[in-house]
Image (cartoon, coloured by chain):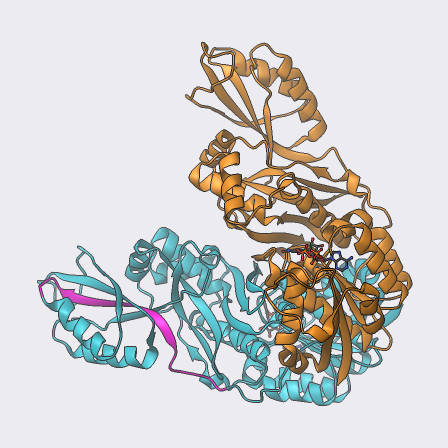
Chain colours: A orange, B cyan
Amino acid sequence: MGFVRVGIIGCGTVGTGTAKLLIQNADLIKKKTGIEFKLVKVADIDWERKREFEVPKELRTTDYKEVIDNSDVVVELVGGKTFAKKVILEALEAGKCVVTANKHLLAEEGKEIFEEAKKRNLFIGFEASVGGGIPVIKALREGLAGNKILNILGILNGTTNYILTRMFEENLDFETALKEAKEKGYAEADPSLDIDGWDAAHKIAILAMLAYGGYLDFNDVYVEGIRNVDKLDVELGKELGYTLKLLAIAKKVDSEVEVRVHPTFIHSEEALAKVSGVYNAVMIEGDFVGKTMFYGQGAGSHPTASAVVADVIDAGRFLLCSSKVLPPVNWEEGELKVRKNFYSRYYLRFDVPDKPGVLAKIANVLADYNISIASVLQKEMVCKIAGREGETIVPLVILTHKAFEEDIQNALKEIQKLPVVVDKPVLIRVEEEAY
Amino acid sequence: MGFVRVGIIGCGTVGTGTAKLLIQNADLIKKKTGIEFKLVKVADIDWERKREFEVPKELRTTDYKEVIDNSDVVVELVGGKTFAKKVILEALEAGKCVVTANKHLLAEEGKEIFEEAKKRNLFIGFEASVGGGIPVIKALREGLAGNKILNILGILNGTTNYILTRMFEENLDFETALKEAKEKGYAEADPSLDIDGWDAAHKIAILAMLAYGGYLDFNDVYVEGIRNVDKLDVELGKELGYTLKLLAIAKKVDSEVEVRVHPTFIHSEEALAKVSGVYNAVMIEGDFVGKTMFYGQGAGSHPTASAVVADVIDAGRFLLCSSKVLPPVNWEEGELKVRKNFYSRYYLRFDVPDKPGVLAKIANVLADYNISIASVLQKEMVCKIAGREGETIVPLVILTHKAFEEDIQNALKEIQKLPVVVDKPVLIRVEEEAY
Ligand SMILES: NC(=O)c1ccc[n+]([C@@H]2O[C@H](COP(=O)([O-])OP(=O)(O)OC[C@H]3O[C@@H](n4cnc5c(N)ncnc54)[C@H](OP(=O)(O)O)[C@@H]3O)[C@@H](O)[C@H]2O)c1
Ligand SMILES: NC(=O)c1ccc[n+]([C@@H]2O[C@H](COP(=O)([O-])OP(=O)(O)OC[C@H]3O[C@@H](n4cnc5c(N)ncnc54)[C@H](OP(=O)(O)O)[C@@H]3O)[C@@H](O)[C@H]2O)c1
């Protein structure tokens, strides 16, 4: 029977859930693992605040160093970048294993942390940083370890998925759906980290690094949020058999990787399209396993604590193993080369006057850029465009075959200059790899 | 850099896929794990047969003992019970770690094997025994290790899911859908292991043992297949908002567990209901994580090989760890007590003459057994009952609230004796825990 001392730094939403789990399920965990995980210290700056679970008085401290000194496994749950990084590096320097849920920090400055852990041959767990309670990091590191990972498609942010679900199901516009999300507590007062795609981008950056075995410059990740999604496109897409999701995508293309987050159409019949509300899901395709999907609650105190504790247990097993074999993870590739000129299908919407010859003009430009058209939808529906109230302006939707992003962007610039196009064209990428 | 010798016994569908994976992705696995996994021997009785992948001649043998002698990890992929058990026990006795995909053997005689492995503190991997390539055993053992598992609902057999999907989508009858499944290669010539629920039962027995930490007498598992599913019920259920699935269920109820496989209605809007065709999915609910779902290909050479190799890698990490810490698994509970009088909602169909007073008679009997009615559907639709062609016989569907199985069975026996009920009533359990 082993014995492992666990300390938590940051007793907020996730920290409180983790303390609760470690105390409440202590016997169960001991039975399952043969190891006693003892919560020995919890640090926070404010112990006056009421919490969902009362951390026993004798475990509380305001000094994070006390946690590091007294634990074998240090759990960082303060969030933010500066102080969290300091905590993690100090814990590693003190020879302690680390568990963190800090996607922001790992995505942007993970390299320094992972290198430090590797140098010292210490376990660093970050299951809770992606997909809340869903054990997707473990799946990628271990469960699918024999596979070459072909691509990853994730719905990794509950707030945006809730909003898009409501827009799709109830034909709400973005602002109304966001307001509803705030009222339900699914969106924060300042929702920009979620709405603008940054949270999902942090998570897919972490998955991409793991899947492709190298570090990523987070600035290379293409990030586009859902703030400008027009309900008209949600509706037109629905008619074409597509559901709009904020997809986080990582793909290996030759020696490069594509890592991107943007509103994406996927076939409404596919499993990912059916992930609704605040749930998260990650589809991973491997060369042998084919397509697998992992689904669950992507956030919240208890689900996230479940992931943190899974890591704590792995850290404990690691510590009790004298020869210290780390779980499979390969940073051998060094820096990953990120490809920005991605290759995708596109949904394009142009608002145009309802007269002959318009489609031909647009199609000509697309042809010039080697973009081939898969289908066209012209609706008998009038767009209201400020300043052009007298005219009959209709939406013209073009679905393309696979094309290069740069070609599409250049073609759009040119099309926009055509006098027949009355507004900025809408571009939404279409993902056929989903299922 | 560690070095681990791997041997395979049984080079059929899964064995061939495993050999292919280990050889084809050898460099990748070495990079990821820092361990060299070398396939050293493969045993089969027939090396004349053409295979998807040619095992190098120098690795082939017909003598399984040669595999055991030369490997650190022995992979048993012969299937069946007698010889496979002998192979596994001999490998363990020789101090070798074992990986197997043999659900049949583990479900029925797992105790002896697990005890032997435990006694010798040897790793035994069986990820491939449930859900093909889906890393669900790992999720249960490790990814969700901090949780008390509340319930598990699985679609664990692709053949039956394909048939039920076709019945639901195209309104086919069972025989037609089965014929189609055979033509597509999704059902074997003798499909009874699948169709009658045994394969799913083997898998849920394994998951139940893991989740609840004790052994199970396989004879205690309630198993009912899909052979007698009437397309009329699939259709009526659909109208009521339900999809029929062959669900494998494990639940903890007080100090007992329910472990059962039967056709089950679940809400059509739930994620499990949308798992169609040959895909598998497992929903696991834990006290902290809430509901999670794992989805993927439940069979086939390559997906199953992916799971086998994940176990081989874990075995290798275990071997290189001198203090040998086994992954969390708790057999502490000893024998699990299986509860047979389960508690569920029910869909009941009675074929009755279209006259007043019939419902009252049936409802009276149900009330006598404390079964309360949630809703009633009487269709203006005529059932064809042999011998009663002259009468107008209609299906009367009753959905109950939660009730005990024994009460339902006793009530049905009594109702069947009522002169108004012209045929054996249909009973289908309804699961509300799904999502
Ligand atoms: N919430 C989720 O559902 C979720 C899901 C996945 C991952 N995560 C990640 O988990 C981490 C924690 O998130 P959270 O939601 O739990 O955040 P939170 O509720 O804001 O908790 C952070 C806690 O850390 C405390 N803290 C701040 N500075 C400290 C210091 N110098 N010393 C000690 N304690 C300090 C804060 O105290 P005061 O507030 O009292 O100042 C607060 O109680 C973040 O990295 C987040 O991205 C969260
Ligand atoms: N197929 C799947 O998709 C799948 C999925 C999950 C789990 N599984 C499990 O994986 C296991 C293997 O399944 P499989 O589909 O690969 O079966 P399979 O195709 O029938 O392969 C079994 C192989 O073992 C060989 N064998 C039989 N007796 C032997 C002996 N005494 N010494 C050496 N080799 C011997 C057979 O040889 P001959 O045929 O030449 O006699 C055959 O090549 C089973 O336990 C099964 O339940 C299979």
Q: Is residue B408 left or right of residue B84?
A: left
The correct choice, above or below, for B39 with respect to B65 in the image is: above
Does residue B63 appear anywhere in the picture? no
Q: Nearer the viewer, residue B393 or B192?
A: B393
Residue B256 counted in the magenta span: no
Q: Nearer the viewer, residue B48 or A49?
A: A49
Give the magenta part as a residue range: B337-356
| Picture residue at 53% right of the left edge, 30% below the top | A230
Specify the quadrant of the image occupied by residue B419. bottom left
Residue B349 counted in the magenta span: yes
The correct choice, above or below, for A156 with respect to A432 in the image is: below
Does residue A381 appear anywhere in the picture? yes
Q: Nearer the viewer, residue B117 or A306?
A: A306
Q: Quadrant of ligand 2?
A: bottom right
Check the image and name the residue furthest to the front. A48
Q: Quadrant of the N terminus of chain A?
A: bottom right
| Picture residue at 29% right of the left edge, 58% below the top | B236
The correct choice, above or below, for A209 with respect to A72 in the image is: above
Q: Position of residue B379 (x, y in %)?
A: 20, 57
Q: Position of residue A130 (x, y in %)?
A: 68, 55
Q: Position of residue B99 (x, y in %)?
A: 69, 75
| Picture residue at 28% right of the left edge, 60% below the top | B232
Specify the quadrant of the image occupied by residue A370. top right
Specify the quadrant of the image occupied by residue B70. bottom right
